[in-house]
């Protein structure tokens, strides 16, 4: 059995060399279970069950099981990594063995645009991020709902200038969409007419742009309050995050007091239904915020702002509903620091 395979995203790949080794002289019955995490496994034959899912099983004689394993294939709509686990049991001798195959999926999309997507968003579960890699790309996310309940979908652009949100039913049929809910960001409120799954589609307006985005779902209609989303290096920074990371720019590293400043940039986006005030911010000890420019609603503006360890200067600053800000930070601390 191969230790690893490489597959192309969205393309079915045959998995050769997977066989059960036994003399088979006693006419034993064997059961082989093959499963993975994010891909789809398929095999043919009357003794195969679960083909076309994340887990399939094959039960029969040695020759029957090996014949079915000879048709084994793997597919995954998204680039990344996966692991296939193969467990075979001799139901007569009660012996078993487990092997794994490392899978590398190259190219393709981060999320597919169909009901087989690996994308998942939960109500009140915070923001998930994705990327529109090419013009025309659409990403789908599965959402579990309760019949009769209302939900609000918020889709904000991080590097994607003008996102557009779509809603589909459990069969993948179009239900509704929204673009520019008062700003360039999108919001859609709906009431579930059945229990189970809906699918949310994220795309660029008119499918003519690329870039990253953030998606979240809340229960009920959109609240008439501001709702802030902060990202660094195109990565969403979760609420109450207490773990500095270089991936989202919250880890400033170590610098010498009085030495050269370390500058990091962050994007502040308000997708709530009321104005977001950014004056009077409470910052960690040793930091200050100074200088700001006002962004027009629905546009991105740079706030000429920095954090330093010596003084605090501030002025009145307000972000209009669903506007976006980019913040530049600088620290002169001798310890490892975070922006918030």
Image (cartoon, helix red, strand yellow):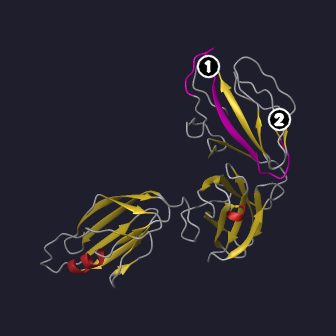
In the picture shown, does residue 190 fall above or below 231? Answer: below
The outermost residue toward the bottom is 46
| Separation of marks 2 and 1 at Cα, in angstroms | 25 Å
Badge 2 or badge 1: first in the primary sequence: 1
Q: Can you identify the residue that label 2 sits on? A: 293
Q: Position of residue 331 (x, y in %)?
A: 65, 24
Instruction: Determine if the magenta segment contains residue 205.
Output: no
In the picture shown, does residue 49 fall above or below 258? Answer: below
Residue 92 vs residue 190, the one in the foreground: 190
Instruction: Determine if the magenta segment contains residue 262.
Output: yes
The outermost residue toward the right is 316
Residue 29 vs residue 208, the one in the foreground: 208
Circle 2 residues within 10 Å: few <14, some 14–19, many ≥20: some
What secondary structure is marked by label 1? loop
Q: Position of residue 247 (x, y in %)?
A: 56, 40
Q: Position of residue 318 (x, y in %)?
A: 85, 39
What secondary structure is marked by label 2? loop
Q: Can you identify the residue that label 1 sits on? A: 260
Image position of 186 (left or right of 209):
right
Q: Are marks 2 and 1 in contact (CB under 8 Å)?
A: no
Bounds of the magenta span?
Answer: 253-276
Locate the N terminus and report the quarter of the image it occupies: bottom left
- Image-quadrant location for residue 244: top right
Locate the C terminus and report the quarter of the image it occupies: top right
Image position of 319 (left or right of 73):
right
Residue at (20%, 75%) from the top-left corner? 92
Residue at (67%, 35%) from the top-left corner? 265
Image position of 288 (left or right of 20):
right
- Image-quadrant location for residue 215: bottom right
């Amino acid at each position: 059995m191969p230790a690893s395979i490489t597959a192309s995203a969205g393309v079915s790949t045959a998995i050769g060399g997977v066989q059960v080794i036994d003399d088979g002289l006693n006419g034993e019955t064997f059961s082989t279970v093959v499963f993975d995490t994010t891909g789809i496994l398929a095999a043919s034959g009357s003794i195969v069950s679960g083909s076309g899912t994340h887990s399939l099983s094959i039960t029969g004689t040695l020759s029957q099981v090996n014949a079915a394993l000879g048709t084994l294939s793997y597919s995954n709509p998204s680039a990344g990594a996966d692991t296939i686990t193969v467990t075979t049991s001799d139901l007569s001798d009660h012996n078993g063995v487990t092997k794994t195959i490392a899978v590398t999926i190259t190219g393709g999309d981060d999320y597919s645009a169909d009901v087989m997507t690996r994308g998942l968003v939960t109500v009140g579960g915070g923001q998930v991020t994705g990327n529109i890699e090419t013009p025309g790309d659409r990403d789908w996310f599965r959402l579990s709902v309760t019949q009769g309940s209302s939900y609000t979908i918020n889709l904000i652009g991080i590097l994607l200038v003008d996102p557009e949100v779509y809603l589909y039913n459990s069969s993948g049929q179009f239900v509704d969409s929204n673009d520019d809910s008062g700003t360039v960001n999108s919001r859609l409120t709906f009431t579930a007419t059945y229990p189970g799954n809906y699918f949310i589609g994220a795309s660029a307006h008119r499918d003519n742009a690329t870039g990253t985005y953030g998606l979240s779902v809340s229960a009920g209609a959109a609240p008439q309050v501001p709702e802030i989303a902060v990202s660094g290096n195109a990565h969403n920074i979760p609420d109450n995050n207490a773990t500095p990371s270089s991936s989202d720019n919250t880890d400033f590293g170590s610098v010498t007091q009085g030495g050269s400043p370390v500058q990091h940039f962050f994007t502040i986006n308000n997708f709530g239904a009321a104005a977001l005030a950014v004056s009077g911010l409470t910052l960690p000890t040793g930091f200050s915020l100074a200088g700001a420019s006002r962004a027009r609603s629905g546009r991105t503006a740079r706030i000429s702002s920095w954090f330093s360890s010596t003084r605090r200067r501030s002025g009145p600053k307000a972000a209009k509903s669903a506007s976006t800000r980019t913040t530049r930070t600088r620290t002169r601390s001798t310890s490892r620091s975070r922006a918030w």
